[in-house]
């Protein structure tokens, strides 16, 4: 059944950009620098290849199965039972991801702004807003993202310009001092895992009003993400140097440093604004995808019937999944990069390969 809700090409591009670049602006420089150190900015280049792979695979599959999500055409490619098992795995993956995103938001707000507030309050307020947006539909999520993302960039771009005066290019040396291996580790572990989040196309493309432009707008979104991440990572390295890989929110430290050294103060308020806007966009899209996946696996007619219970379960999951910020950081550093690459790149690529082989076998038989 074709989805009745539709989003425009521009809205899809902004959703992709916001979903990937929203919260990693503060966390990704430190995660990449843990592996690549002063060469973290080089890691951004090969990591973009994983994003390109996700776009190519998801757009090609959507052309072969127009109007269907990855949950639906997985059953056509793998068969009913294997396809259903894969769908259940994706439900688990999105539930875990949603819980992680929510508690990550809560820990950030608690550490920077509201240290005495219970964690569940931060999670609850975010999930209520996101749940309302999901209940209203993907069109409302797209319009909210279309409005909020330019606002976020409007406040962030002046900060990026201010970093130029404090940047020290000597911090980038020695280039490739430890060889190419740390650069590739930074690219294909934390970098690649986050760039691969573009595989959300597997759920969003059926809602696009001009499917023929999907590939072009996705590549433009990837280009925007690459430029944005590259500027953020290289500016963090040039200001913080070797400290970058030791900080959970490295770009937040860059903002605070600018506030101390320059004419502006308390710039972390802008960081909070950027984080909250990004978390809203990301959690809303993830909650929408989770509800859609469950409704398609269990043949529920209206996904809106699931929004309230899934939002409540996500709240419970955000409290249950990690005991403290150290466990969250361990997950983001060691577990998610590998799980993300497998789930977001290798499984869709395997689906494409199986579908192509089946097509060749069928043609040879006829």
Image (cartoon, rainbow, N blue to C red):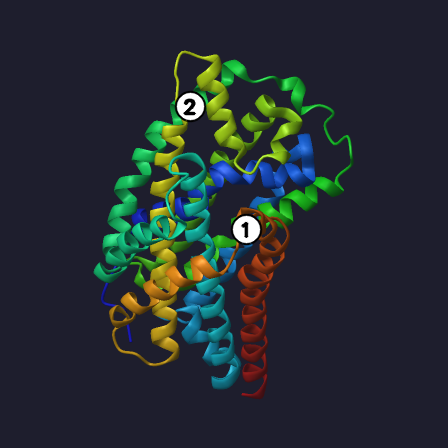
> Pointer 2: residues within 10 angstroms few (<14), some, or many (20+)?
some
- Name the quadrant of the C terminus: bottom right
The residue tagged with tag 2: helix, strand or loop? Answer: helix
Q: Which residue is drawn at 66% across and 21% down?
A: 171
The residue tagged with tag 1: helix, strand or loop? Answer: helix
Q: Can residue 256 be seen in this view?
A: yes
Is the residue 159 above or below the residue 272 in the image?
Answer: above
User: Which sits in the foreground, 215 or 29?
Assistant: 29
User: Which sits in the foreground, 58 or 329?
Assistant: 329
Q: Residue furthest front?
A: 116
User: Which sits in the foreground, 301 or 248?
Assistant: 248
Residue beneath disc 2: 159
> How far from the left and from the top, in percent, is residue 341?
59, 57
Q: Is residue 204 visible?
A: no
Q: Residue at x 58, y 47 (%)?
A: 326
Left or right of residue 32: residue 206:
left
Is the residue 70 above or below the residue 113 in the image?
Answer: below
> Pointer 1: residues within 10 angstroms few (<14), some, or many (20+)?
some
Left or right of residue 162: residue 147:
left
> How far from the left and from the top, in percent, is residue 121?
34, 50
> How far from the left and from the top, in percent, is residue 188?
64, 49
Quadrant location of residue 1?
bottom left
Q: Distance between the residues labelled 2 and 1?
A: 28 Å
Residue beneath disc 1: 328
């Amino acid at each position: 059944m074709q989805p009745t809700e539709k989003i425009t090409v521009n809205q899809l591009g902004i959703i992709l950009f916001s979903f990937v670049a929203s919260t990693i602006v503060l966390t990704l420089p430190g995660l990449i620098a843990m592996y690549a150190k002063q060469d973290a900015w080089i890691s951004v280049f090969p990591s973009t290849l994983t994003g390109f792979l996700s776009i190519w695979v998801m757009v090609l599959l959507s052309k072969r199965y127009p109007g269907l999500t990855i949950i639906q055409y997985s059953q056509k490619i793998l068969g009913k039972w294997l396809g259903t098992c894969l769908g259940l795995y994706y439900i688990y993956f999105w539930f875990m991801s949603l819980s992680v995103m929510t508690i990550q938001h809560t820990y950030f707000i608690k550490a920077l702004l509201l240290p005495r507030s219970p964690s569940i309050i931060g999670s609850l307020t975010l999930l209520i807003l996101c749940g309302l947006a999901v209940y209203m539909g993907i069109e409302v999520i797209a319009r909210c993202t279309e409005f909020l993302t330019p606002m976020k960039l409007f406040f962030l771009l002046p900060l990026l310009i201010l970093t130029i005066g404090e940047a020290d290019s000597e911090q980038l040396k020695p280039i490739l001092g430890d060889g190419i291996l740390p650069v590739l580790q930074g690219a294909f572990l934390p970098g690649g895992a986050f760039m691969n989040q573009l595989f959300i196309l597997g759920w969003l493309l059926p809602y696009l009003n001009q499917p023929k432009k999907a590939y072009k707008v996705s590549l433009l979104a990837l280009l925007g993400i690459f430029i944005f991440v590259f500027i953020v990572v290289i500016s963090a390295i040039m200001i913080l140097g070797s400290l970058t890989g030791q900080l959970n929110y490295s770009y937040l430290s860059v903002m605070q440093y600018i506030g101390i050294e320059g004419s502006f103060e308390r710039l972390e308020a802008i960081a909070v604004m950027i984080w909250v806007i990004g978390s809203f966009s990301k959690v809303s899209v993830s909650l929408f995808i989770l509800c859609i996946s469950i409704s398609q696996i269990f043949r529920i007619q209206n996904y809106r019937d699931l929004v309230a219970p899934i939002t409540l379960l996500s709240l419970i999951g955000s409290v249950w999944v990690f005991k403290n910020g150290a466990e969250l950081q361990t997950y983001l550093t060691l577990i998610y990069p590998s799980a993300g690459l497998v789930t977001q790149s290798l499984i869709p690529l395997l689906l494409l390969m199986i579908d192509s082989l089946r097509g060749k076998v069928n043609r040879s038989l006829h």
